Image: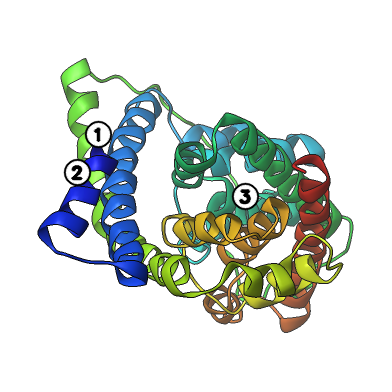
Amino acid sequence: MWKNFVDYLTVDLMGLQGRLNETINFFIYDTVKILFLLVVIIFAVSYLRTHFNTEYVRAHLQGKSELYGNVLAALFGIITPFCSCSAIPLFLGFLQARIPLGVTFSYLISAPMNNEIAIAMLFTLFGWKVTAIYIGFGLFVAIVGGFVIGRFDLEKYVLIPVQPINEKLEAGEVKMSAKERTKEAWEYTWDIVKKIWPYVLAGVGVGAFIHGYVPADFIAKYAGGENWYGVPLAVILGIPMYSNAAGVMPLVEVLTDKGMPMGTALAFMMAITALSLPEAMILKKILHTKLIAIFFGIVGVGIICIGYLFNYILK
């Protein structure tokens, strides 16, 4: 129904034709669809999250085994819709709580890559199968990446003095009425949407241009399934870019429509969301360059491997 209305709007009322019509039609259709579904899904997840005290994670991780901490920190990333840069303050909070460095990196990898916004948009655009595979492999990269970082003696590369929290952390029970939960969930949803809508417009705009004007054979030639270098090239190109899932997902949709293998496109998305130059610049203030390089290297290699697996599974 919405698609029919947009077709009527661009063709009958606006009189658009050819590539310009394809571009404008795609932009209007996807922008409204994505924003509407984001509001609905983020509100639903936010309401459920009012039953969960996020401070419980820090309190619970104290004194636990490192591998257990890697798994829990990666799962915690799903319910915190941060980009790679805004996840850093909680990363420091984990360090202050004397949580192992590798565990804190599992969170830093997972939060921007596996958060509810990415999950909501993946489900909206590609269905439950792709979403489930993405979540599974995204958590795998975060858990293994953090665990590997934790195997090295890298604490000495934390440059700032982190004031440790020596006492045992406590996390109280969250007691709220249904009305209070609804109000908090809506305020949180609106706050998130206000922050990400420019990324949605930018992402859909770039995607609309590619959809209307970039030939499918051009993308297939340089990033098609037959090219072994497609996945690492996508990851290398993705790292300098800075966006969140809301901004890059429309681009992923168009690239796959144009012939890019799903695994290559999702590896591109992972690189953009989990690794970015602005993130490296902020981390440079608190971590030695060597530790940042190890972090980017381990996660980058992990994403490349996952990209190849995606392509194999999603043929």
Q: Answer yes or no: do the residues labelled 2 and 1 have beta carbons within 8 Å?
A: yes
Cα distance between the residues tagged 2 and 1:
6 Å
Q: What's under tag 3, amino acid-wise?
A: Ser
Residue 197: percent from left, percent from top: 28, 59
Cα distance between the residues tagged 3 and 1:
36 Å
Q: Earlier in the sequence, mark 3 or mark 2?
A: 2
Label 3 element class: helix
Q: What's under tag 2, amino acid-wise?
A: Phe
Cα distance between the residues tagged 3 and 2:
38 Å
Residue 221: percent from left, percent from top: 73, 73
Q: What's under tag 1, amino acid-wise?
A: Met
The image quarter containing residue 108 is bottom right
Q: Can the viewer see residue 239?
A: yes
Residue 5 tag number: 2
- Quarter of the N terminus within the rendering: top left
Look at 82% across and 64% down and name the residue there: 301
Residue 62: percent from left, percent from top: 66, 38
In this figure, which residue is indicated by the disc labeled 1?
Answer: 1
Numbered disc in front, either 3 or 2? 2
Q: Tell how many labels.
A: 3
Q: Residues within 10 Å of mark 1 (few under 14, many from 20)?
A: few
User: As displayed, is residue 210 above or below residue 62?
Assistant: below
Look at 76% across and 77% down and name the residue there: 293
Look at 45% across and 57% down and name the residue there: 250
The image quarter containing residue 37 is top left
Q: Earlier in the sequence, mark 3 or mark 1?
A: 1
- Quarter of the C terminus within the rendering: top right
Label 2 element class: helix
In this figure, which residue is indicated by the disc labeled 3?
Answer: 110
Label 1 element class: loop
Q: Residue furthest left?
A: 13
